[in-house]
Image (cartoon, rainbow, N blue to C red):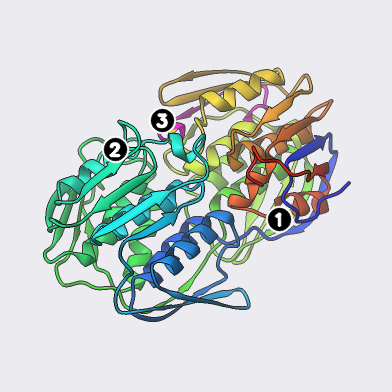
Amino acid sequence: MSASTIVPTAARITPSATLRGTVTPPGSKSYSARAVLAAGMAPGRSRIRRIANSRNVRALIDAVATLGAEISFEGDDLVVVWPTELRDDQTIDVGNSGIVLRLLLGATAHLHRTTFVTKYPESLGRRSNIEMLDALRQLGVDADWQEHDGRLPISTYAAGIHGGSTSIESRKSSQFLSGLLYLGSRLDSALEIHVPDELKAPSMVRTTQQVLAIAGVETSASPDGLHYQVAAGTAFAPAEFSVGSDPASTAALLALATALDSDVSIRHTGLTELDGVVDYVRSVGGNVTVEYDEIRVQGNPAALKPLDFDGSLSPDSVLPLAALSAHADGTSIFRNIEHIRYKECDRISDFRTELSKVGIESEETVDSLTIHGNSAGATRSAVIDSHFDRAIVLAFTLIGARSKHGLIIENSGVISQTYPDFFRDAAELGIDLQLSAEPSVKSGA
C-alpha cells in the first residue's frame, strides 16, 4: 500500500474491512478562499489562521498576489499585506475553481480591465458564467468572453460602473451572489441585489457574509434570502480570520467511516456548511458523537438504511452521501440538487455514468438523483473517470473500499483541489489503496 502526499494520476482502491484511527480534515476551502479575498481587499495586514492547503485556495492566493498583495506564510497561517490600490490591467489564472473565478469576477469588476483564464478548458472552461456577466452589466460593467454563455477567457471593463440595483439568477450557483457582495464596498452608492428565482446553497452565502463582517463590510439579507444590500460607505479593513474544517472533506470522512466497520475520530477546528449531514449519517445507521473538537464515528455496515436528503443544505456532501446510500438496501432520493450539475463536472449525470460501470443502479431528474442501493454495493470492477472533480474521487473511494473487486480512479490527482492528503489519511485509517504518479498531461497533475 502506497499513500504518500504525491499527486496521483490514478488510484487503485481495493476492498477494505475495517477503519481505525484518528484523522484531521483540511481547513475549509470555501472559507479560506473567501478570507484570502477579503484580506486581499483590505489595505493593511491581515492574518488567516489554519488556511487550507488546497489547489483552489492556492489559485486565489496567486490571484491576490497578481493584484498586488504581499503574501507570506507563518506556520499554518497566511499573512496578507495589501497596498492602497489594486493593480489594474492584469490577467489572472483561476485554476480549475468556480469559486475563485466567480468571487474575483465581482471583486475586481471596479477595475479598468481584468482578464480571467484557465488551463482547464474541458472542466472549468465549459462552465457558464452568463448570470454573473448579466448582473455586472446592470451595474455598468462591460465584458467579453469566449462563448455565447460566458465561458472563459473573460475580460471585464469597469468604465461605466455604478451602484444601485442588480439581479442575479442563483438557481445554478450561489457563487455569483457571493461575488457581487464583495463588489459592493467598491461602489460609490449602496448596492441592492435581488435573486429572482431561488437561492441554492444558502449556507455558503452565509459564510460569505460572515467573512465580510469580520473584514468590516456591512451586508444585510431579507428573511427569505432573496434580497441583499451592501451599505454605502462600507469598506474592507484588515482582520484576523480562523478557518474551520472543510465541510466536503469532513462529510466524505463521515460517510466513509459509516460505510465500513469502523471506530474513527475526526478532529475538527469548527463545523460549517454541514447542515443536515451529521443527522443524515446518524439516521442512516452510523453511531456519531459530536464534541467540541472531535467527531467519533462507529460504523456498522449491516445497519445501513436508505434515506432521502435535501441537497440544498450541503451541496458538496451530496456525492459522498449518495455513495453511502448505495450500500443500504432500498431507494434513497437526493433532492434540490440541480446546482451540482454546474460544478467541475455534472455531478448528477457524470456520477451516474460512473455508477453504472460498477453495477449500481440510479435514476435522475433535472434536480434529483435516485440511488437504488443494496448491501453488496458495486458488483463489478471498473476504471472510473474522475471528470476532474474531487467529489467523484471521494465518492468512489468509499465505493471501492466497500466493493468485492475494487476499482481504479483515473485522474485522481484532482483531490488536491480540496484535500491534498486524502489518500495518505485514508490509508492510515485502513483503506487498502495504491497510487500511480506517472506524469499525465491530461490530468494536469
* Magenta stretch encompasses residue 343: no
Viewer-closest of 227 and 174? 174
Instruction: Indicate the secondary structure of the residue bearing disc 3.
Output: helix
- Left or right placement of residue 229 versus residue 348 in this view: left
From which residue to which does the magenta span run? Answer: 325-341
Q: Earlier in the sequence, mark 3 or mark 2?
A: 2
Viewer-closest of 86 and 194? 86
Mark 2 neighbour density, 10 Å: few (under 14) some (14–19) many (20 or more)? some
Distance Cα–Cα, label 1 vs label 2: 35 Å
Give the amino acid type for the residue marked by disc 3 in the picture.
Glu
Distance Cα–Cα, label 3 vs label 2: 17 Å
Viewer-closest of 141 and 190? 141
> In this picture, is 116 found above or below 45?
above
> In this picture, is 311 found above or below 212?
above
Mark 3 neighbour density, 10 Å: few (under 14) some (14–19) many (20 or more)? many
Mark 1 neighbour density, 10 Å: few (under 14) some (14–19) many (20 or more)? many
Instruction: Indicate the secondary structure of the residue bearing disc 1.
Output: loop
Q: What residue is rendered at 77% in x and 39% in y?
A: 11
Q: Which residue is mark 1?
A: 421
Q: Which residue is mark 2?
A: 130
The image quadrant of residue 69 is bottom left
Q: What residue is rendered at 49% in x and 38% in y?
A: 121
Give the amino acid type for the residue marked by disc 1 in the picture.
Asp
Instruction: Give me the disc on residue 338.
Output: 3
Looking at the picture, how far across and down is residue 386, in whole percent?
63, 34
